[in-house]
Image (tube, rainbow, N blue to C red):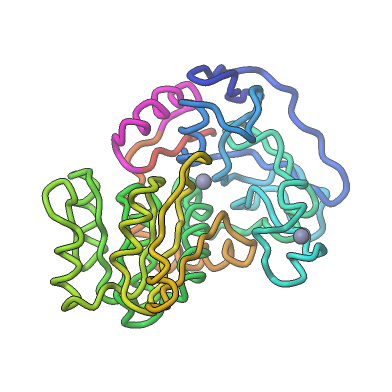
Amino acid sequence: MKVLKYIEPRRVEIRELERPSIQAGEVLVQLHACGVCATDVKTFMRGHPHIKPGTVLGHEMTGIIAESQAEGWQIGERVVVAPYVPCEDCRYCARGQFTLCEKLFEAYAEPGGFSEFLRVPQRIVQKGLFRLPAEIDFALGSLVEPIACSYHGLEALRLGRNDSFLIIGDGPMGLIQAILAREFGASPVVLAGLTPSRLELAAQFADRVIDVSKQNLRDEIKTLTNDAGIDKVMVSVGQAQVAEDALALVRRGGVVNLFAGLPSSSRISVDPGRIHYDQVTLIGTFGFAHTHFALALRALMHNPSDFAQLITATVRLDGLEKAFIDSAQYAGIKTVAILA
Ligand SMILES: [Zn+2]
Ligand SMILES: [Zn+2]
């Protein structure tokens, strides 16, 4: 079978690998689609502290079961596969803090998403394998993973009905969050970004779009909220300065989520008065739990047409290298690799 291997920063190669064999409790999935994620792009461009050369990238995976040794799963079923699931056994899982699971990445789907076939280990079969309904095509189904991450982020913010909500960032995650926020009943939903084409699309999902290259974000939020500040803020851009700005935009008692990862060398400076007197809460979320995966699939089924607009390009395995380079330059929104 063919896979796309990450060799070193700026270098990927299509290689031939032996098709993985499965054991009791496992399934083999013939992959049909895998989304290109910011993590894949970052790894390709600059390397990644946890992703070793030789890895097969890609983790937003859908396909058809080609072999099954798992009860209840038949050959020919269309599925979406979570790349990891918690153990439900460690001290964090016992507290429901699944994304902190000590063994989160111990069971992983092999070799990775940019591959023709995928071995799904038993733990993922049990908690992270979901049937993809006929009305959701494989490319669209690959959005379940990023939607799940966003769901986790919104849930942690306790985003509620009539909360004013600001998303900073017009990447795929920011746009997904704008679509989801409406489902959560947030109002108004405001999205701030820099890329005209993305903001144009965002205007379909958000009540208000702010182009920070032309408008002053702080002034806009002041006007919009009669000086009170915004209830909940999602920082979906990995920049320390933006995280600091977010803390100035949130209302007293509001919540800010550092959703995007920041470079490990970054530091932010926080006015403690905002935390103490203004009782602002600063949180962060990473990844998703299997529980969010199920909710994300439901959200996608509820509103497939909005989410479908986020897929702006599809490529084959040999088109991924260019897709990584294009994504790094903010071209389009979401690219999905079609694998079968
Ligand atoms: Zn992803
Ligand atoms: Zn655990």
Q: Is residue 45 above or below residue 84?
A: above
Describe residue 136's horizontal placement relative to residue 198 as left or right: right
The image position of residue 296, as x and y in percent, is: 51, 63
The image position of residue 68, as x and y in percent, is: 78, 47
The image position of residue 110, as x and y in percent, is: 71, 37
Describe residue 212's horizontal placement relative to residue 335 as left or right: left
Residue drawn at x 18%, y 44% as measured from the top left: 196
- Foreground: 257 or 181? 257
Asked if residue 319 is among those painted magenta in the image, a careful observer would answer yes
Asked if residue 93 is among those painted magenta in the image, a careful observer would answer no
Q: Is residue 272 above or below residue 335?
A: below
Describe residue 114's horizontal placement relative to residue 272 as left or right: right
Residue drawn at x 68%, y 46% as measured from the top left: 65
- Residue 258 lies in quadrant: bottom left
Q: Is residue 37 above or below residue 51?
A: below
- Foreground: 196 or 69? 196
- Foreground: 338 or 192? 192
Question: Magenta region's main secondary structure?
Answer: helix
Q: Is residue 219 above or below residue 309?
A: below
Q: Classify the position of the N terminus by image quarter.
A: top right
Please state the quadrant of the image where ligand 2 appears.
bottom right
Q: Classify the position of the C terminus by image quarter.
A: top right
Q: How many marks on residues? A: 0
The image position of residue 198, as x and y in percent, is: 24, 47
- Foreground: 276 or 54? 276
In this view, the residue farthest toward the bottom is 161
Magenta range: 315-333
- Residue 96 lies in quadrant: bottom right
Residue drawn at x 36%, y 33% as measured from the top left: 327
Residue drawn at x 11%, y 49% as measured from the top left: 214
